[in-house]
Amino acid sequence: MRSGNVEAIVGSAAAALALTGVLHLVIDLSFGMGWAAVIAAVFFAIIVWRWWGRSIHRKLKNLSRPHARGARAPSRVVARTPR
């Protein structure tokens, strides 16, 4: 299972680089190298955030909470009075 996850991550990284390269080539031929570099960098940053950044951010946020690491969350004890 772990090797499948690694291969999926490597494959998505290769796809991100390929898409960025194609975008860079098209923009370079259309508008010049300066615009191509800027647009390709912004596009790659957006892809990184959408594909991996949000997941990593959520996981780190959950790890900072004590109950996410296996500790029990503090329970609320409500005393009942007999009727």
Image (cartoon, helix red, strand yellow):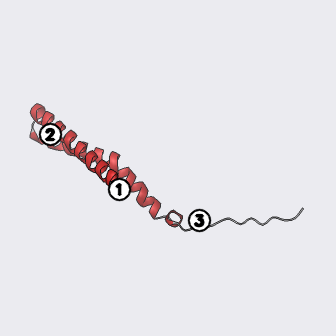
How far apart are labels 3 and 1 at the CA level? Answer: 30 Å
Q: Earlier in the sequence, mark 3 or mark 1?
A: 1
Q: Which residue is mark 3?
A: 73
Q: Check disc 2 and report the residue beneath it.
A: 36
- Which of the two discs, 3 and 1, sits closer to the camera? 1
Above or below 49: residue 73: below
User: Which comes before the other along the chain, label 2 or label 3?
Assistant: 2
Residue type, numbered disc 3:
Ala
Q: Residue at x 15, y 43 (%)?
A: 37
Q: Is residue 4 left or right of residue 37?
A: right
Q: Whole-percent x and y of residue 53?
A: 34, 52
The amino acid beneath tag 1 is Arg
Neighbour tally class for label 3: few under 14, some 14-19, many 20 plus, Cα within 10 Å: few
Left or right placement of residue 82 versus residue 26 in this view: right
Which element is circle 3 on? loop
Where does residue 48 sit, x and y in percent of width and height? 29, 48
Residue at position x 34%, y 45% in the image: 50
Q: Amino acid at mark 2?
A: Ala
Q: CA distance from mark 2 to mark 1?
A: 37 Å
